[in-house]
Amino acid sequence: MEETEEMGCDLCFWVRIYNMLGDRFPTNIQAKIPQNTMTNDYYYLGLDLSTQQLKGIVVDAQLKQVALAKVDFDRDLPAFGTKKGVFANAATQEVLAPVAMWLDAIDLLFARLKDLVDLGRVRGVSGACQQHGTVFWRTGAERLLAQLVGGDSLKEQLKNALAWEMSPNWQDHSTGKECRQFEACVGGVDQLAELTGSRAHHRFSGPQILKVKQRTPEVYDSTERIALVSSFVASVLAGKYVAIEESDACGMNLWNIRERRYEDSLLKLFGDDVGGIKQRLGEISGAGPNVAGVVSEYFVTKYGLCKECEVVPFTGDNPGTILSLPLRPDDVIVSLGTSTTALVVTNKYVSSPQYHLFAHPVAPESYMGMLCYCNGSLAREKVRDAVNGDASGSWDRFNEIAERDMAAGVVLGHGAEREVGFFFPLAEIIPSVAATHKRVSWASDGASTPAAVSEQWERPEDEVLAILESQALSVRSRLAPMLSTSDRLPRRVYFVGGASANATVCRALTRVLVPTEGGFRVPDMSDACAFGAAAKAVHGVLNCSGVDAQSWEEFIVARTRQEQFAEVQGSGSRGEDVYGERAVELFRRSEEVCFGSRQT
Ligand code: XUL
């Protein structure tokens, strides 16, 4: 019938028919539905290329996991001889990864996925990769990418595509000189943080690229395109250069985040004519759902992907992590691992040399703030061992003391004095200070100088609540300016990482952070980046096909069961603020006393 054939071109028509028929739809007709529908018969792939492994998660349109595969670089690709995925040179402080290893890993991962799932059903692929690393494509590489065909491995077909066979890893520390050039160029650390979201860091791509230009000009000169790890993997998938994605671009110290453009004053470090570096970096693909093209013929013939499978721009691993939870502006993830990290979604751009701001990977109007502390679980474990008086590693006594003190309403110490502690067994990043252990006592009369500053605590017991208060007050104090809520408190806080299994620790932190819509413990975040990337793929494809245009927030909230998170019970979670601005101010003044000028 003519009418039906015409309608057959209309995607929405097919979706309506499919939804009406539901399960009664015969499989042979189902196969004829245009590819870009929102049915759960289509799959989406999220990749996570981290330091030690490449992981792939396949999900359906509702984000239900269908398959998971991994390639461990040291174990599965021993011929490259990496240790924990990298080559580290203690003398030069360089940490590098071989790019060919990643190409082999991509082949191996797809071979493994092919054994688990029908890759022909995958409609979209995205990724979340280690941040800051760069790949230097040699002049002519895009032609090699475009010619990729099934047969020889990626490594073989792209063997002449690299101007440098290595990629600097985020653990690299060799760019001190270049970092100073970056900061001097714009007038200092504050100015650089204001423009690019971060002060200069050794690992950031801008200083790393400048090092290549200054120290190995032959590599720079033969480079046609510089990719981040994320855009490198996307380019291999798409068989063409895929633009760097905006959120990941913020890890370069080159992108003017607020004005959404390269910062020319910094590009001038690469020569007065900024055209050369701009051309090498290419355009930046903006936040919001978009697709970069379809997968290359290579993946269709070799692994059975369908020709229509879209490549959705890849982002960095930290931006990828925030896509794994139903975060809205003013929501926070606190990762309680060896180090402590706090990630916040915010609509306010408030920069500081102490933390990082990135563009949000999917919501164009938002930003992501990232606080990275060095000290986390090691510091808590020291107090735990001190109260145990042994190295049994049991948290029972620590938790018992913390619960007892919280129940007794203890806030900043037991006595008439208020006490603020700093517990840094390792040199700290926020604030940037050497290892130290301090106790600052304030008389309750509001005096502007502390009654005492010491390196000793009389009773290890008093350190239990003090360390949890201190770690949380630091986060609360730094988050406050980024939050748009009237009381400068977060909406929800999600605890992830090792210590999130400890309900008492989360309760004590929640008591300080006061999330007005609750604190939640997330059971397992080990696959969060790959999952966030898969969610980005679904959102990108559904929005771009016009079938299911939803904001990111609507999309992710609708697909998350909030009940899977254990709500933290007790004061602070949707409850009263027993600390208040007074405690935060006392914490800030204690930092000032111990570490010099005001630490913002
Ligand atoms: C972030 C950073 C690390 C890497 C790890 O700035 O350097 O989190 O992204 O892969």
Image (cartoon, grey):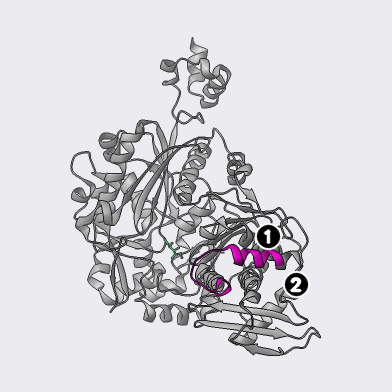
Q: Secondary structure at mark 2?
A: helix
For the residue marked with disc 2, what is the amino acid? Glu
Point 76% across, 62% down: residue: 486
> In the drawing, does residue 460 fall left or right of residue 49?
right
Q: Is mark 2 within 8 Å of ligand 1?
A: no
554 or 2, nearer to the observer = 554
396 or 38, nearer to the observer = 396
279 or 208, nearer to the observer = 208
Q: Relative to 112, is 585 above or below?
A: below
> In the drawing, does residue 503 fall left or right of residue 122?
right
Q: Relative to 383, is 149 above or below?
A: above
- Determine crowd level at label 2: few under 14, some 14-19, many 20+ residues with C-alpha closer than 10 A: some
Magenta region, residue range: 386-404
- Mark number displayed over residue 490: 1
Residue 282 image offset from top left, x and y in percent: 38, 58
Residue at the spot of label 2: 581
Residue 371 image offset from top left, x and y in percent: 55, 67
Q: Earlier in the sequence, mark 2 or mark 1?
A: 1
Q: Secondary structure at mark 1?
A: loop
Point 50% across, 28% down: residue: 39
- Determine crowd level at label 1: few under 14, some 14-19, many 20+ residues with C-alpha closer than 10 A: many
Q: Main secondary structure of the magenta part?
A: helix
